[in-house]
Amino acid sequence: MKISHIEHLGIAVKSIEEALPYYENVLGLKCYNIETVEDQKVKTAFLKVGDTKIELLEPTSPESTIAKFIENKGAGVHHVAFAIEDGVANALAEVEAAGVRLIDKAPRKGAEGLSIAFLHPKSTLGILTELCEKPE
């Protein structure tokens, strides 16, 4: 698999509206996109830091994985996403062959139109890992 860069850091927040003033007014970052990903039951907000993005994740349902994460661990860093240059499907096959446990067996659509897949933190040293690629 060819990783080009960290695509984004996912940060779980209870409320994007309450979190944005810190990122915008204190850190001086600018939110450039807010969208809801219905099938993941999450609202996202994106800010750029150089070539890397910060993705704020707000649950839209008590059943969402983000709501459960916040309930169990509190708000904070949720995942690290890597940009894959040679395809998420190829990367999944490669890491599965290496014995890594997959959350997603195939790529799916994520925020900003990216193809995404997650690797289970029990196989990735405790870090929920997301693989991303821009659609062709």
Image (tube, rainbow, N blue to C red):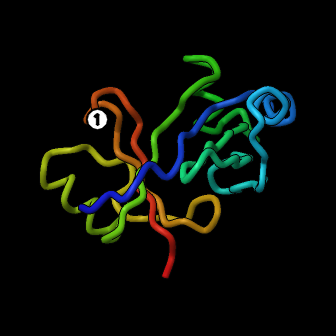
Q: Is the N terminus in the top left, top right, bottom left or bottom right quadrant?
A: bottom left
Snapshot quadrant of residue 127: top left
Q: Residue at x 56, y 17 (%)?
A: 72
Q: Secondary structure at mark 1?
A: loop
Q: Is residue 28 above or below residue 135?
A: above
Q: Does residue 51 appear to the left or right of 122 in the view shown?
A: right
- 81 vs 51, left or right, is left
In front of the other: 32 or 40? 32
Which x, y percent locates residue 55?
63, 44
Q: Is residue 109 above or below residue 46?
A: below
Q: Residues within 10 Å of mark 1 (few under 14, many from 20)?
A: few
Q: Position of residue 66 (x, y in %)?
A: 62, 34
Q: Which residue is mark 1?
A: 124
Q: Residue at x 13, y 55 (%)?
A: 97
- At horizontal 35% and vertical 68% (from top left) the residue drawn is 85
Q: Above or below — where is 25 with respect to 3?
A: above
Amino acid carrying label 1: it is Thr
Q: Residue at 14% across / 45% down in the picture?
A: 99
Residue 37, percent across and down? 69, 56
